[in-house]
Image (tube, rainbow, N blue to C red):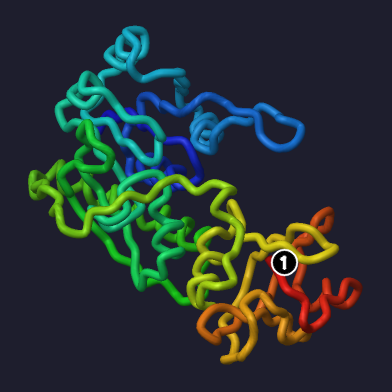
């Protein structure tokens, strides 16, 4: 097939690579503009742009998808379909109807659950037992289009958002390959999404990072792993400032005020309803990420300390 590919972050790269390995002709790659990254605000290309350039593919980075200039640029490309994987912008009707097969999207959830920007992370934060990927035909809504195919993947109790993200990116590439093959064969029919179970997965931000120790340990554990590697769950330690928490596990039942350190080796904190959480990996202010046991060797946190 002759294709236009639209995508931006790492999640989209395996899908682009798979299209190329399957022999499709990717005539144009559309991705978001380069952005400043890090403390030094270095202009950095999206992962999809880097991948496209490594394959000598033409790249287009419009500021808006709704201008006449953008529409005209895309109309010049003769394509059978537009493939959209985590592009990050809603497409207007003029683009949705531009090709004979329309816009085919890979989404990182089992739709209609977790429509929106952060489906992978919210599946982990909410403690879901499984997640998956969906291919669908895009419409003008937010991930509301008709479903083509789905694949499912169990979520391990200790799997992080980052780990699930990587797995679903690969699953999505495989599902996209099957979707296009079956569309070419004429053996695939799109199905409207059910209304039951629909929910929205909003973008994560740093305001969601602070841990509420009044919640049960399992809930906090899910928050920690869902926010790893970004934006990372945090807590406040007296005289040590804000601490990032990367890895935990649920400890034994305790009888203490939530937030109280009940054991220093391993570092164990009382949580709501008599539960406790063991902190395995952390990062203190101005320090590198390390195992909690290593940090405590030089920076003890006494039993009875109350974390906020």
Residue 288 position within the rendered picture, expressed as x and y whole percent measured from the top left = 80, 59
Based on the displayed image, in which of its 4 quarters is residue 240 positioned?
Answer: bottom right
Residue 101 position within the rendered picture, expressed as x and y whole percent measured from the top left = 16, 32
Q: Relative to the observer, which residue lies in front, 307 or 35?
A: 307
Residue 59 position within the rendered picture, expressed as x and y whole percent measured from the top left = 47, 23
Q: Relative to the observer, which residue lies in front, 283 or 52?
A: 283
Q: Please state, as top left, top right, bottom left or bottom right, where the C terminus lies in the image.
A: bottom right
Check disc 1 and report its element: helix, strand or loop.
Answer: strand
The residue under the point 77% across, 82% down is 304
Residue under pointer 1: 282
Q: Residues within 10 Å of mark 1 (few under 14, many from 20)?
A: many
Q: Relative to the observer, which residue lies in front, 96 or 20?
A: 96
Q: Is residue 33 left or right of residue 257?
A: left
- Look at the picture and state if 24 lies above or below 33: below
Q: Please state, as top left, top right, bottom left or bottom right, where the N terminus lies in the image.
A: top left
The residue under the point 33% across, 16% down is 66
Q: Relative to the observer, which residue lies in front, 66 or 174?
A: 66
The residue under the point 36% across, 20% down is 65
Based on the displayed image, in which of its 4 quarters is residue 236 positioned?
Answer: bottom right
Residue 45 position within the rendered picture, expressed as x and y whole percent measured from the top left = 58, 30
The residue under the point 35% across, 45% down is 116
Number of residue marks: 1
Q: Is residue 103 visible?
A: yes
In the image as oriented, which residue stretches furthest toward the front?
Answer: 257
């Amino acid at each position: 097939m002759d294709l236009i590919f639209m995508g931006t972050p790492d999640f989209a790269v395996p899908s682009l690579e798979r299209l190329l390995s399957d022999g499709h002709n990717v005539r144009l790659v559309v991705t978001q503009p380069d952005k400043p990254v890090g403390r030094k605000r270095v202009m950095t290309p999206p992962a999809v742009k880097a991948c496209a350039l490594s394959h000598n593919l033409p790249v287009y980075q419009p500021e808006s998808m709704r201008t006449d200039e953008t529409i005209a640029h895309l109309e010049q490309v003769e394509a059978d379909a537009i493939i959209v994987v985590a592009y990050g912008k809603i497409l207007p009707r003029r683009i949705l109807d531009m090709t004979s097969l329309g816009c085919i999207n890979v989404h990182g959830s089992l739709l209609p659950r977790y429509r929106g920007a952060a489906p992978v992370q919210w599946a982990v934060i909410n403690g879901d037992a499984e997640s998956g990927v969906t291919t669908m035909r895009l419409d003008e809504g937010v991930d509301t289009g008709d479903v083509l195919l789905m694949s499912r993947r169990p979520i391990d109790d200790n799997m992080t958002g980052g780990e699930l993200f990587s797995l679903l990116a690969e699953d999505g590439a495989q599902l996209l390959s099957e979707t296009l093959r079956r569309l070419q064969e004429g053996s695939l029919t799109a199905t409207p999404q059910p209304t039951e179970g629909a929910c929205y997965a909003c973008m994560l931000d740093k305001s969601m990072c602070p841990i509420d120790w009044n919640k049960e340990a399992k809930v906090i554990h899910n928050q920690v792993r869902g926010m790893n590697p970004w934006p990372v769950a945090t807590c406040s330690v007296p005289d040590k400032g804000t601490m990032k928490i990367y890895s935990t596990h649920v400890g034994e039942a305790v009888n203490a005020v939530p937030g109280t350190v009940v054991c220093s080796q391993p570092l164990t904190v009382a949580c709501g309803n008599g539960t406790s959480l063991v902190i395995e990996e952390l990062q203190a202010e101005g320090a590198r990420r390390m195992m909690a046991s290593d940090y405590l060797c030089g920076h003890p946190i006494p039993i009875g300390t109350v974390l906020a």
